[in-house]
Image (cartoon, rainbow, N blue to C red):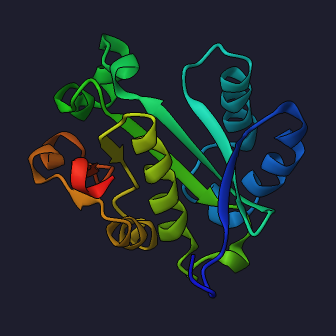
Amino acid sequence: MKWNEPEISFRPVVQQDYGLLRSWMELPHWREWWGEPDTELGLICEMVEGRDSTRPYLFLIDGVETGYIQYWFVKDHQNAEWIAKHPWLADLPANSVGIDLSIGEEGKLSKGLGSAVLKAFTKMLAAKGYKTMIIDPDVNNRRAIRAYEKAGFNFVPSLEALASDVHIMQLELNEKST
């Protein structure tokens, strides 16, 4: 680790984190890209309690809880219900995982944390055996798109016609990059 690089770590979300997550979800920069806090927190509760296969984490910068990140299994979303709403899911490799993230406090935006966290998270996922990762920011979320590009994700032009509201990006790892 370089002297000026922050230490990035991840820990699974637990019930005691719900208050912190709700406080972040109520902030304007979260509300702009995520759903209603009650709905979003309800979804995370489903994950924590094992009723949804998505894996939720907090990310910590130098030991301080700084944001939320999750990964989800594409194969679990390749069904008629999900594909009707998000047709691009049908064209993704079933063994890939999707990633979503948000920085907790607005004052930490535009400081390179999103890219750094995403790089560290994809390294952790690669160690678990995942080689194809997808991220799907809103087409209007230019800050997120730039951060994901810096983390190595590339736009998937073949899915553009199927995904009018999101910018599908993919990271394909090979043996040399892990």
Residue 107 vs residue 130: left or right? right
Residue 137, x across and y down, in percent: 40, 55
Determine the residue positioned at 64% across, 13% down.
51
Does residue 102 appear left or right of residue 72 in this picture?
right
Q: Residue furthest bottom?
A: 4
The image shows residue 130, relative to residue 119, as above or below, that is: above
Query: Residue at left 36%, top 36%?
Result: 130
Quarter residue 105 falls in: bottom right
Residue at point 32%, 49% (across, down): 165
Q: Residue 25 at x, y = what percent?
A: 73, 52
Q: Quadrant of the N terminus?
A: bottom right
The quadrant holding residue 18 is: top right
Relative image position of residue 39 (x, y in whole percent): 69, 33
Point out residue 38 in the picture as x, y percentages from the top left corner.
Answer: 76, 36
Q: Decide which of 42, 133 is in the foreground and name it.
A: 133
Using residue 92 as the reference point, say whether residue 107 is left or right of it: right
The image quadrant of residue 46 is top right
67 vs 156, left or right, is right
Q: Nearer the viewer, residue 114 or 129?
A: 129
Position of residue 15 relative to residue 46, above or below, is below
- Tally the marks: 0
Above or below residue 105? Residue 159 is above
Name the foreground residue: 49 vs 82: 49
